[in-house]
Amino acid sequence: MYVRPEFRGRQIGALVLTELETWARELGYAEYVLETGRRQPAAIRLYENCGYSLIPNYDQYSGVESSICMKKQVALEDKVLA
């Protein structure tokens, strides 16, 4: 995701990430995986503050030195059928 410089510092990235996580949870995903660049310290901080941890680079990012991959594991609540 990208936030234009004049809008940074307003938690827009965190709001977008929260909405994406809500959508993923509604779809039944129990983990979220992302990639960002090593030269994106603000993005890395955001993801760490939101519970993401570093993982080995995956798939197309394997061996790409400029990439950082992260994952967040979440617990899905049991859904009760009405």
Image: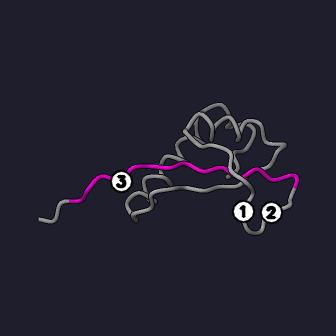
Query: Residue 46 at x, y = what percent?
Result: 64, 37
Q: Nearer the viewer, residue 57 or 12?
A: 57
Work out how far the residue at label 3 is from the one at label 1, CA to CA, in angstroms: 24 Å
* 41 within the magenta span: no
Q: Which tag, 2 or 3, sits closer to the chain's start? A: 2
Q: Decide: few, some or many residues near mark 1? Use Cα within 10 Å; few <14, some 14-19, many ≥20.
A: some
Which quarter of the figure is the C terminus placed in? bottom left
Residue closest to the far bottom: 60
Query: Residue 23 at x, y = what percent?
Result: 44, 59
Which residue is depicted at the point 70% across and 50% down? 2
What stretch of residues is rendered in magenta?
65-79
Residue that carries the numbered disc 3 in the rendered image: 76
Proximity of marks 1 and 2: CB atoms separated by less than 8 Å? yes
Work out how far the residue at label 2 is from the one at label 3, CA to CA, in angstroms: 29 Å
Residue closest to the far top: 9
Which residue is depicted at the point 65% across and 31% down? 9
Q: Is residue 8 left or right of residue 82?
A: right
For the image, the number of numbered tags is 3
Residue that carries the numbered disc 1 in the rendered image: 58
- Residue 62's disc is 2
- Residue 12's disc is none
Q: Secondary structure at mark 2?
A: loop
Q: Disc 3 marks which amino acid?
A: Leu
Q: Which tag, 3 or 1, sits closer to the chain's start? A: 1
